[in-house]
Every structure is written in structure tokens, then in C-alpha cells.
Amino acid sequence: MDWQNVLASRMGGMKASEIRELLKLLDRPDVISFAGGIPDPALFPADTFREAMARALCGPGAAKALQYSVSEGYRPLRDWICTQMAALRVPCDADNILITSGSQQALDYLGKLMLDPGDTALVGWPTYLGALGAFRAYEPRFDRLSPTGNRPAADIRAAAEEAGGAVKFAYLSVDFANPTGETLTLAQRNAMLDLAEELDIAIIEDAAYQVLRYDGEAIPPILALEIARKGSIEDCRTLYCGSFSKSLSPGLRVGWVCAAKPVIQRLVLMKQAADLHSPTLNQIATHLVAKEHFTDHVATLRRTYRARRDAMLGALARHMPDGVRWTRPEGGMFVWLTLPKGLDGADLLVRSLETEQVAFVPGGAFFADGSNANSLRLSFSCATEDLIDEGMKRLSRVIRAT
Ligand code: PMP
């Protein structure tokens, strides 16, 4: 069968990333990898989850844990999330929360909710690869969002109209972004909100790494700033996407959207059409573990990842040649490296794997237009401090030899 004859046009924009294909080869034990960007499995609260799952499956509760459940998500978990959101200055109730299968599913639903082919999605340059992938299925045009100084709203709108669509949303990762590790200042968050108001568009606030802060003052989410302006979440254009992937377990696939009720109600319809609900047992176990252990567990994660972040920043300062620049994240899992002009992150990865067995993600993949290839993303979450030093030493040798 010639599948081309039956494929939808949207499949044209959905290609397997060469980088992801290359990264599949990284399971070799001799490779020191800074590519992953995933939690360190040694830190998973496995015993606590084992106990929680056993409790969920004991007695009459077992029927509930194994049964279909409501699309909105497990009510006690939504209530627990409300207490966390309130601590972030986002007062809301359970009807403002939809549980999704990871925040990745939320990004897909929000793309589906708002994008017609040819519409414009404003994204960072660079931005999270998985967000670009989720939105691409809805055939948008991407335009550049720059928190350090945007083009006038009228220019952004005119460019979108010329391309035959409308600007629908700005997608932002405000704390310790993937891939740059950078955090938006309070002024930048307010400026983003001003821009969204002027353009009359939604804001997708991706908070996947929000709890992983290692130093500096926490800054309120954009949703909190908007509630302070408007008085109630019901009047807000910000759609907050949270996740337990980086705090408890990515494998259980539990995330959430927090937003005004009319949006949540529409997303519930999507959830019903897509997968009915996220796994009941995973939601119950996540609730049990979160309510009893969240604070302590996150404190352990912060301590461990902070030491690795410090090790990476120290090793970069010791080993990198002149002309290489990098970010200094206050949290999360990533440092973003800018190479001297003319160097290409993808070429460097091939050489690095051949000669020094060090892996990272080339930066070009994170730009909607593939530009800025002279960059790369390093993740410090899964490497020990010794390996980080050795890895940076090797990486600097590859860069010097280029
Ligand atoms: N947003 C960002 C910025 C991410 O880095 C990731 C995962 N790496 C996600 C969303 C999706 O995570 P999950 O679906 O596991 O919540």
C-alpha cells in the first residue's frame, strides 16, 4: 500500500527528528551522556509508590482504582493540586483543574483547542522541542517571542494576517526553561502578559520544572500575576500546565492544566474523545505519595540536582575555551551552551561521539526555523559530579579541536 495516498496533510510537518534518531544510539555504556533531560532514576520514590499502589489496590478501593473514572481526573488529586496552586498565588477550585497524561498531552490539547492551519503560535527562540512537535500537528506558523524585547504587537499581528491566519497564543516556559535553563524575570512576565492582552491571545504557561529551584527568589507564575490584575482565574487568558514528571515520576504520566472553567470544560471534551481519562491507579497513587511525601522528596531532589548544577558550572568554567558562553540556571536540568559562530552543534555531536564519547543535544533542533545551530543543550540531572567534570573536559577537547 502507498501510505502517501491516505495520509493527512498534517503528517507533512511531522518528521522523525534526526537528532532523536541519533540519540537512540546513546545506550552504549562508554558514552557520558548529557543529552537526556530526564529525572535521575536513582531518585525515584519507588518504595513510596509501591506502598501507595498496594494501598490503592487493597479492599473495596481496588474496584475504584481499576475502573473507568471521570475525564476531569481524580477529585482528591485535583483538590491537592489546588492547594499547591494557592501557594503559588493562584486561588482556584477543582473545576479549574484537568488531569492530563503528562503535560505533553496538555500541549497537544491546547494546540488542538486553538490552532487552525496557518494560524500563528508565538514561541521562544529556542523553545521546548516537544511543544513544537505537539503544535506542529495542527499546521501552524511559528513566530518569534522575545521576552527581552518584543516587536510591536501590530507587527506581529500583521505578519500573522499576511500568512493567512491569526495569532492564537504565546507559549512560554517561565522557570528554568527547556532547553536554556533560563527564568523570566517579574518584569518580563508582566511584559508577556501586556503583549498577550494587546494581541488578545492566550498564554500557555509551561511549568514543567517549577518546583526544581536551587537558589534565588521564586517568582509568581504568569497566571498569578494575571489573577492579581483581574481578580479571578475566570477572567484569565493564561493556561497553566503543571506536571508530576520532574517531581515524582514521568512514567506514571500525570500532569494537569489549571485555567478558567470554560477552557477546562472544552479540554474535558477533548480528553473524552482522546483517551477518556488518565490512568485511575496512577492518579490515586500520585495523590497518596504527593500528600504525604511531596515536600520532603522535592527537597532531596533540589539538594542533589543543585550539587550537579554547581558541578557543571564549575567544570565549564575550568575547561571551556574562550568564545564559548553558557547560561547559569537557578533550577531545572539544563545549561545552554553557545559555541563560537561557524561551529555546528550537530557536527560537533557526531565528532564528540566518535572521539570522546560525550553526548548532548545540538541546539538547532530547538529553533522553529532550525537556525542558531552553533548551540547545544547539556543536562546535568543524571550525571554524578565526577562524570560531569570528566565530560566537560572531553567536550572542551572536541570544541578546541574543531
Ligand atoms: N514541558 C517541558 C518544558 C518539558 O521539558 C517536558 C518534558 N521533558 C514536558 C513539558 C512534558 O513533560 P510531561 O509530559 O512528562 O509532563
Image: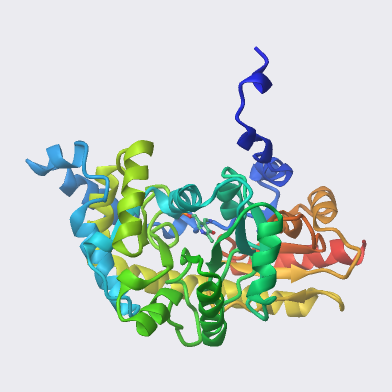
* Rendering coords of residue 94 (x, y %): 22, 62
* Rendering coords of residue 388 (x, y %): 66, 67
* Rendering coords of residue 153 (x, y %): 63, 74
Q: Measuring 30% from the left and 53% from the top, which residue is drawn there?
A: 265
Left or right: 327 as drawn, with respect to 202: right
* Rendering coords of residue 369 (x, y %): 75, 55
Q: Quadrant of the N terminus?
A: top right
Left or right: 51 as drawn, with respect to 44: left
**In-front residue for pair 254/262:** 262
The answer to which quarter of the image holds residue 277 is top left
The answer to which quarter of the image holds residue 77 is bottom left
Q: Measuring 22% from the left and 51% from the top, which residue is drawn there?
A: 74
Left or right: 176 as drawn, with respect to 85: right
Taking 304 as reference, is 276 above or below it? above
Q: Is residue 124 visible?
A: no
Protein image colouring? rainbow
**In-front residue for pair 339/392:** 339
Q: Residue furthest top?
A: 1
The answer to which quarter of the image holds residue 290 is bottom left
Q: Quadrant of the C terminus?
A: bottom right
Left or right: 246 as drawn, with respect to 286: right
Q: Measuring 56% from the left and 65% from the top, which residue is drawn there?
A: 170
**In-front residue for pair 230/19:** 230
